[in-house]
Image: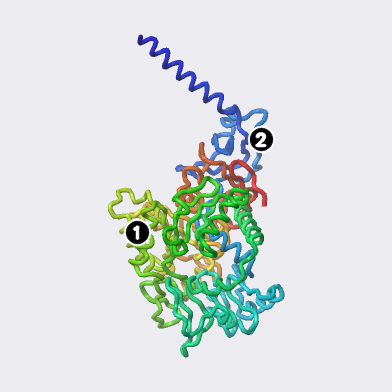
């Protein structure tokens, strides 16, 4: 009897082995070799070759070992010719539709080069756009930035915009996305007057000392009356712009991106349907991890469940906004800004703490990941306190992977508390580059500015951090983020290092745009590193960032982007 049982066991085992052998193809579809392969695994190993089969990585190691096991007559051999292969970049905070609207359909006024614009050059660009505005249309633009305008903090008013046109309504969103500017025609059409109450959620229709509207708007709720009157772009034009934007993201080596505010620019249900249609019809060249915009979710909404979707499109979180922009002087700080001299302005929270907590708790209890925009240390305090209450009694808070977006002006105590709660900060690392000099010399002073985007502090405490663009706030370029995180050199001469003790190694910065960013979006089991079993999401670079001078990493060329073992075109 014992012999029969043993024979039966061996027969079953042999059957399983034979089935596995038959099911698996004997060879790889592709083998990459001939250049450094950066795995970004736990040991940061660099190997010689990588094999792909069925869209997944099946081997990494020496060329000899990979070829011996996986190369067949049908295997495609790709010689890197000295170029570098590494995981596809992961972008955990992009407004994809917002970028498509701002840069694809609107007038893009963003200027990330020197010299800065002036009010005159901005007005000239707006006038040049007027001829393309159809009857009944609005002149919509994005990207003016007083902190990057000459003279410093020169700001548009309704009177300035009236010089461009008194008949065409003009609506401009500041580079930060938290401030707007309109002319008097726009105010008229939107029905906003001196007696209009400020909207909830931090919105402000700014007035001068005489109580007259200046044309400046603070926080997105104040944009709503103007956006409601603007003609919606034709669906075909919007889809074309989204495809162009996602192709641009892919061209930067990004294989997975967040859409951080579904429902911000138009009704939630419309944008959910739009994304589902795009994914179903191969309209997304990249993977998308989507976050619903909390204030846009209708009461009792049950159209989506947490983690609904597939590897191409998945809805995983809900995002809230707790304050404004640091460079726009609207982020909520514990101490006043340094600019202008002797100001008492500390910015303001968008919501009361209990109000925001109750909004978040609904979706936290449903199982959604929660992300909160918090730029100022007052907003970070509010967010961390709310997170602490949400996580009360949870023995493993890190499993919820709660996010703080930006974490710009902060304290060492906040870093320690965030790590204890398992919070993942996403740093808009361009703050160091494009705005570093303004923060240090004018807006918050050296002490607070040097702690912006505290990468080294999080590493020291044992926490994770990720880098992102917040596009269209800054350009999508993970190689640039690596330069910024490891070098922390600000752009405007005389160039200086912002917070030298917050610099991290190039390997740490690489992890912030690959495996850490994947972890931040619950995708580290499938992407973010080159390991057996993961999706073959890859990027080929013209040089190895590990051996390139830190400030030159941003200039490395992205040669190819691969998703699921397929080369992408753009």
Outermost residue on the left side: it is 393
Please state which of residues 331 and 139 is positioned toward the viewer in this rendering: 139
Picture quarter with the N terminus: top left
Per the image, the residue denoted by label 2 is 76
Q: Secondary structure at mark 1?
A: helix
Kindly identify the residue that appears in the image at 57 percent across and 61 percent down: 97
Residue 333 screen position, x and y as percent: 39, 72
Mark 1 or 2, which is nearer the eye? 1
Residue 450 screen position, x and y as percent: 43, 66
Please state which of residues 268 and 543 is positioned toward the viewer in this rendering: 268
Residue 305 screen position, x and y as percent: 45, 50
How many callouts does the rendering have?
2
Please state which of residues 440 and 349 is positioned toward the viewer in this rendering: 349
Q: Secondary structure at mark 2?
A: strand
Residue 66 screen position, x and y as percent: 57, 32
Kindly identify the residue that appears in the image at 57 percent across and 76 percent down: 149
- Residues tagged 1 and 2 counted as in contact (Cβ below 8 A): no
Tell me if 460 is positioned left or right of 195 in this view. Answer: left
Crowding at dot 1, Cα within 10 Å, few <14 / some 14-19 / many 20+, comes out as many
Outermost residue on the bottom side: it is 210
Q: Which mark is residue 387?
A: 1
Mark sitting earlier along the chain (1/2): 2
* Residue 438 sits above or below residue 89 on the image: below
Instruction: Give the quadrant of residue 416.
Output: bottom left
């Amino acid at each position: 009897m014992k012999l029969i049982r043993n024979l039966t066991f061996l027969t079953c085992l042999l059957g399983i082995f034979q089935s596995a052998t038959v099911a698996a193809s004997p060879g790889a579809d592709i083998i990459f070799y001939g250049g450094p392969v950066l795995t970004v695994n736990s040991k940061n190993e660099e190997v010689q070759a990588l094999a792909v089969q069925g869209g997944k990585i099946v081997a990494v190691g020496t060329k000899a070992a990979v070829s011996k096991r996986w190369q067949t007559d049908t295997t495609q051999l790709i010689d890197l010719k000295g170029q570098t292969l590494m995981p596809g970049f992961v972008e955990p905070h992009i407004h994809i539709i917002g970028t498509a609207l701002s840069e694809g359909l609107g007038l893009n006024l963003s200027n990330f080069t020197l010299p800065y614009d002036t009010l005159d050059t901005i007005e000239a660009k707006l006038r040049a756009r007027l001829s393309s505005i159809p009857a009944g249309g609005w002149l919509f633009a994005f990207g003016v930035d007083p902190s990057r305008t000459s003279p410093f903090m020169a700001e548009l008013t309704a009177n300035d915009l009236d010089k461009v046109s008194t008949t065409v309504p003009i609506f401009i969103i500041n580079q930060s996305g938290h401030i707007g500017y309109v002319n008097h025609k726009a105010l008229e059409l939107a029905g906003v007057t001196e007696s209009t109450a400020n909207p909830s959620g931090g919105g402000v229709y700014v007035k001068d000392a005489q109580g007259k509207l200046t044309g400046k708007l603070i926080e997105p709720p104040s944009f709503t009356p103007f956006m409601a009157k603007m003609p919606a772009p034709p669906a075909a034009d919007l889809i074309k712009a989204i495809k162009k934007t996602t192709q641009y993201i892919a061209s930067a080596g990004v294989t997975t991106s967040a859409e951080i505010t579904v429902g911000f620019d138009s009704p939630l249900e419309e944008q959910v349907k739009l994304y589902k249609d795009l994914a179903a019809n191969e309209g997304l060249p990249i993977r998308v991890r989507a976050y619903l915009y909390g204030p846009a979710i209708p009461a009792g909404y049950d159209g989506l469940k947490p983690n609904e979707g597939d590897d191409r499109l998945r809805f995983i979180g809900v995002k809230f906004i707790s304050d404004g922009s640091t460079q726009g002087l609207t982020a909520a700080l514990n101490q006043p800004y340094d600019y202008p001299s002797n100001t008492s302005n500390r910015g303001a929270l968008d919501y009361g703490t209990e109000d925001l907590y109750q909004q978040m708790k609904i979706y936290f209890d449903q199982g959604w990941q929660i992300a909160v925009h918090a730029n100022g240390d007052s907003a970070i305090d509010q967010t961390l306190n709310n997170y602490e209450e949400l996580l009360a009694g949870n023995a493993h808070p890190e499993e919820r992977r709660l996010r703080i977006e930006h974490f710009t002006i902060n304290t060492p105590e906040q870093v320690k508390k965030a790590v204890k709660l398992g919070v993942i900060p996403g740093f808009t690392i361009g703050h160091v580059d494009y705005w570093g000099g303004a923060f240090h010399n004018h807006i918050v002073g050296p002490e607070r500015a040097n702690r912006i985007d505290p990468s080294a502090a999080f590493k020291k405490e044992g926490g994770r951090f990720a880098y992102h663009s917040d596009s269209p706030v800054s350009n999508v370029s993970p190689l640039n983020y690596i330069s910024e995180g490891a070098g922390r050199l600000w752009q405007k001469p005389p160039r200086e290092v912002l917070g030298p003790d917050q610099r991290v190694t190039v390997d740490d910065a690489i992890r912030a745009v690959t495996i850490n960013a994947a972890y931040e979006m619950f995708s580290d089991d499938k992407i973010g590193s080159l390991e057996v079993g993961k999706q073959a999401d890859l990027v080929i670079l013209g040089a190895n960032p590990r051996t390139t001078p830190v400030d030159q990493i941003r200039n490395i060329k992205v040669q190819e982007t691969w998703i699921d073992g397929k080369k992408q075109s753009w």
